[in-house]
Structures are given as C-alpha cells and as structure tokens.
Amino acid sequence: MIATCVLALALVVASSAVLALVRGPQRTDGAGAGDTATSARRWVNTWSAMPQLTEPGNMPPAPFTGDRAVLVDTTLRQTVRVTTGGDRVRLRFSNAFGGSALPLTAVTVALPLGGQAGVGAIEPGTSRTVTFSGREATTVPVGAQVVSDPLDFTLQPGANLTVTAYLAEGHASLALTSHPGSRTTSYLRHGDHTEDTDLPGATPTNHWYLLSDVEVLSRPATTAVAVLGDSLTDGRGSTTNGNNRWPDQLFDRLQEKPGTRHIAVVNQAAGGNRVLNDGLGPNALARLDRDILAHSAVEQLIVFEGINDLGTAEATPAAQQRVTADLIAAYEQIVVRAHAQGIHVYGATLLPFDGNTPYDDAAGHREAARQAVNTWIRTSGRFDAVLDFDRAVRDPENPSRLLPTLHDGDWLHLNPEGYRVLAEAVPSRLLQRR
C-alpha cells in the first residue's frame, strides 16, 4: 500500500513537471495572471543606440573624466526619441565595453520640457523612478546589460523621452560604453539631480552614454524594422536635436498611414562601422546577434552597410575584388542568420562617393567594386527585397556622384533633404505586416 502511494505521488510530481514544461516560464513583464489585456501584448524595441567603446575624443568632458574613472558623483540627463508608443516602458543599460562593473545609483524617466529633444529641463510632475528587480540601484556587470522593471508611463508615438541617471561611485574605468554619434545634446552635472526639473549650469555634450534601448509594451500587431548601418544611417550631416536621420523620417512617413502606424524603427548604426572588420564598433557580422537578432519584436531588417569596407580597402584591382567577394559572402551570412529567426531582410544599394576624400580613387577601382556589389544586391535574389538607395540620390548626369543638392559637402554623407529622399525610397507597403 505504501509503495502504491509513493508511486502515485511520483506520478503526480512528474505530471506537474511535464505540465510546467509545456506551459513554459511564467510572465516576467509585470502583468498579472488574470490581466488578459496586458497578457495579449508584447514588448517592442522602440528606440536603440548601438553600444560601442568610447574613443578618447568622445569621453565625457572635463571634469567628468578623471585619470582612472568617469562620471564620479555625476548626474547624466539624456533625451531620446521613441518611435512606436505605449503605456508601459522599460530601459536597457549596456556595459558591453566597460572595463569595470557599472553601478547605477538612481534612474528616472520624464517628459522633456516642451517635448523637445536635447533639452536639460523636464516637464514638472512627469518624473518617475525606475527600478531594477524592485530596487532603485543596480550594478551592470562587465560585458552585460540590465533591463529595468516595467514602469507605467505613457509615451506617444514619436515622443521624446528624458532619461536621467546618477552614478555616486562613477565608473571605475576609462573603458566606457556609449554611442558617440547621438546628434542629440546630453547634460552632465555633479551630485544627484535625478529628480530636478532643470539642471542649471550643467555641461552639455553631444553624445549618449550607457543607455542602449527603450522598450514599450504594445499590442501584438506592433512590430519593429531594424537598420544595420554606418554613418549614413547614424545621421552624419543631419541636424543636432533635429531627429531628421533617414530612419527618423521613415518613421514619420509610416505614421501617416494606418497600415504602418504599428511599426517601430530601430536604428542600429554607427559612424565608421564596417561589415567585415572592426573599426568604430565591432564589425556587422560580429554584432548582428546583439544589435539585431536579440531585439524585441524585430521582424524586418534593412542592411545598408559596406561603403566603409570598400573605402578602407586598398585601391587596387586585387584588393577591391577581394573585398567585393567578401562583402557578398557576408551579406549572405546576414540573410541566412536573420531568416533563421524569421526576419525578412532587405538589401539597400551603396551610395556614390565620387569626389570624396579619401574614398574616391582616380583609377576608379573602388567605384568598380561599388558597382559590382550593387549589381549583386539588385540581381542575386538573396534579399527578400531591394531598396535602391543609389538610384534615389545619384546624379543622373554623373551616376558615380551624389546629386549636389543632397550631400553635406563631402560627397559621401547626406544632408537632411538627402535623408528625406532615402526615407521616401522605402516603399511603406513593403513594411506592412505579412
């Protein structure tokens, strides 16, 4: 009889274990078990900045960078423009390239004064405390990131958000994670001012530090399109605090039509980035998992990168033929890895750079390589669709050059009007959910 009871108990326990495996892990988004409206929603990445190691010239300005540590007893206030909106928000802080653990003493979110980007003041009464596993302070290990607790905080699509962090101890290393090409003004001030409505006397700097992502809890139909790119996507030539990079302007277009208002745009680009080799940030193949595949609700990917690979390879026929073949192989790898996650991949053709110093070469070897790469992008059939950015911005009278009215003076990077043309070259119907 005892043996029979033991056997029955064992079967109950085993059945419970199997049931738990079938059900999967319990929710961790803060929704209650009976909250059907919340449980039907999902987290969507609505803003992102590619983490990279901060170069010496982009470190926090004096006196916020010392001999062995940075941001000691410092409040850092930053604004970011989200894409899709929601009524619950959570943040991600990255220590991907930090040389020591990153202790965050306090973090708040608020709406910036007047809803503007790059301002140091916030709207009174909008500040909310951010917590991490129920605590106001957290420490991000070396190489890791930390995700905050969900916070009830309503963000409208395209709104600017202020994130303020205080580091009492600072970061005990000069190896700091940041996104230098913010094109947005941040503010630094000694002491804990996370709850202050303004930061008079604060030191401005046009870089983002530590913050890597903002997510919102949204309806199931909401998706994200991510962009893998370099300075042309990071927005060199755009307006500081203007949010007029081409992904920003693409989002604005998507908001105009009901069929595409559900799409978030995730900009994962950095100036100088390359597909094949490290430079300013890890190469695109190395960062694909972290910057694209691991992001919430990404269902589509635009690949617009490779110009720096051509421009930094030696201007000889052999070197350019080699980098062309390697780029094509790399694009194929990106497509295969993204498809494995159910992500559609769109290839964007590379823009002209005739007249640019140092990329243009008199013999035209790099231009020949660009043409070969673009021909493959257009005709190989490996991408799910092709975005012909080259055709959109080149000079019809001189196709190896950009239209003079669209670049920022260096014959490589675009101005806000040029970025508008790129945004217009992405068919909105392509991004509608399948």
Image (spheres, grey):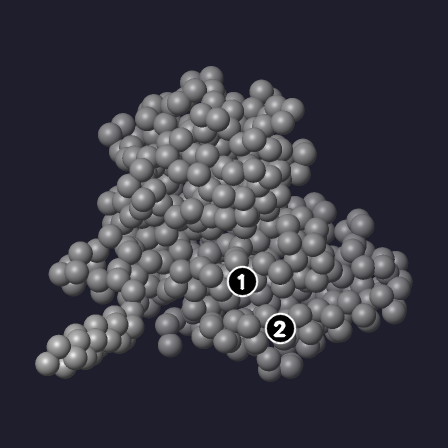
- Up the image or down, 411 lies above or below 329; here it is above
Q: Amino acid at mark 2?
A: Gln
Which residue position is annotated with label 1?
A: 289
State the image coordinates of residue 362 (x, y, percent, origin top left): 88, 58
Q: Which mark is residue 406?
A: none
Q: Nearer the viewer, residue 294 or 237?
A: 294
* Res 124 quadrant in image: top left
The 10 Å Cα crowd at callout 1, few under 14, some 14 to 19, many 20 or more, is some
Q: Residue at x 77, y 57 (%)?
A: 311
State the image coordinates of residue 131 (x, y, percent, origin top left): 32, 39
Work out whether mark 2 precedes mark 1 in sequence or the reverse, and give the earlier one. 1
State whether residue 146 appears in this view: yes
Mark 1 lies on a secondary structure that is: helix
- Up the image or down, 3 lies above or below 277; here it is below
Q: Quadrant of the C terminus?
A: bottom left
Alpha carbon distance from label 2 to label 1: 12 Å
Q: Residue at x 52, y 71 (%)?
A: 338
Q: Amino acid at mark 1?
A: Asp
Q: Quadrant of the N terminus?
A: bottom left
- Up the image or down, 53 lies above or below 349; here it is above
151 on left or right of 96: left
* Res 363 quadrant in image: bottom right
Mark 2 lies on a secondary structure that is: helix
Q: Residue at x 54, y 44 (%)?
A: 142
73 on left or right of 232: left
Q: Which mark is residue 333?
A: 2
Q: Nearer the viewer, residue 98 or 426?
A: 98
Residue at the left extreme? 1
State whether residue 12 appears in this view: no
* Res 402 quadrant in image: bottom right
* Tally of numbered discs: 2
State the image coordinates of residue 29 (x, y, percent, origin top left): 28, 55
